[in-house]
Amino acid sequence: MKKFLLVLTLVLCTISAFAQLPYSAHFPRWIKNGSLHSDQTSGITFLRTTTAGKEFLLADDTGFLRRLIISQDTLFIIRDLVLAPGVAAYFDRFPKKDFEEIVYDRGTGDVLLSIEGNDPGFIKWVGVYKLTFAQNSPFNDTVVAVSKLVFTPQDTFLKYTASNIGFEGFAADENYFYAGLEGFQSGKDFADSTYLYVIDKHTNAIKKIISTKGLGIQTICGLCAVSNGKLLVMDRNQAKLFYITIGDSLDAHVLANMTTPPAIPQYTQFPYTQALESVTFDDEGNIYLVDDPWKSHFIPSAKIFDQLDKSTQNSFKEFIPVIYKLTFQTLMNGK
């Protein structure tokens, strides 16, 4: 009888956890279409909605850029972007093509890419780069030029970077760029807070460096500007999504936050070790989060893994990222 009650309790807890998941119907999902899939996705940015569906750009920290189109929440189209020979040669110089954040600046039409630096000489490579597309259109699949932005004072901007530690979060509104340092790492542990840089878009001058300690944010692994001075912040290490405001005095305040529980696609009653590293916001008030698989811990325990179908098991074995969707209202409700 005690064993039955224990099993019943576990079942009820599982049902309760499933009911409380904050995500939209049909999500989470694997970012794949047949044999095509993204890999170590660290950045996502929303472009537009067309008759084909909702269109995004993805940045993988394996050095790939991709276009993702989601139709009716269930059909995925994935295309690799083409790097012109000069652009490919430019990135081939990097010790690691550690692409992190990708941003579509609606005010200028620019696409910006944040890249972490790696040794040897990480300081030379870390930064934010402007991508120029064929026909000067981000809806074209060929990148024809790349240039590095310089923020001043440059030594201040680069002061806290390190090998494999850079600006995993980057965003733009009408007035400012926002650069979020991933965090401060000692060994395998991160500190309890990091820094958010506010940069004048017209001069590229740093206007303020905000400590996230008072905001309760430990790491910044994804940023998205919802509107002027309103930012979504993905804190990977706490598995929490924050909505913050930055006022005229450039002081930051938290408007809402929520936890982002892991859930296996089609098996949302089961958790896994997630590492959400990117966030974007579409034209209908939906938020998208993408998991950059942590390869040493991504595959769930054998007890869970053995209950999954072969396709799901293969998705884990191939380290395919997971995308989540939720409504902005869900975030505001803090659920």
Image (cartoon, grey):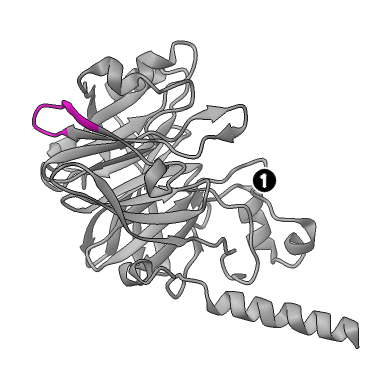
Residue 130 percent across, percent down from the top left: 22, 30
Query: Which quarter of the rendered picture does the C terminus lie within?
Result: bottom left
Q: In the displayed structure, does residue 142 sit left or right of residue 5?
A: left
- Relative depth, front residue between 133 and 259: 259
Residue 236 percent across, percent down from the top left: 49, 47
Whether 20 is among the magenta residues is no
50 lies above or below 9: above
- Relative depth, front residue between 85 and 327: 327
Start-end of magenta stretch: 200-208
Q: In the displayed structure, does residue 280 sit left or right of residue 264?
A: left
Residue name at image x 42 percent, y 46 percent? 217
Residue name at image x 38 percent, y 48 percent? 215
Residue 284 percent across, percent down from the top left: 24, 68
Residue name at image x 41 percent, y 56 percent? 241
Residue 135 percent across, percent down from the top left: 13, 38
Categorize mark 1 by other alpha carbons within 10 Å: few (<14), some (14-19), many (20+): few
- Type of the residue with mark 1: His
Query: Which quarter of the rendered picture does the N terminus lie within?
Result: bottom right
Q: In terms of image quadrants, where is residue 43?
A: top left
- Relative depth, front residue between 315 and 246: 246
Q: In the displayed structure, does residue 120 sit left or right of residue 4?
A: left
Q: Residue furthest bottom?
A: 1
140 lies above or below 62: below
Q: Residue furthest front?
A: 214
Q: In the displayed structure, does residue 303 sit left or right of residue 153?
A: right
Q: In terms of image quadrants, where is residue 302?
A: bottom right
Q: Which residue is mark 1?
A: 297
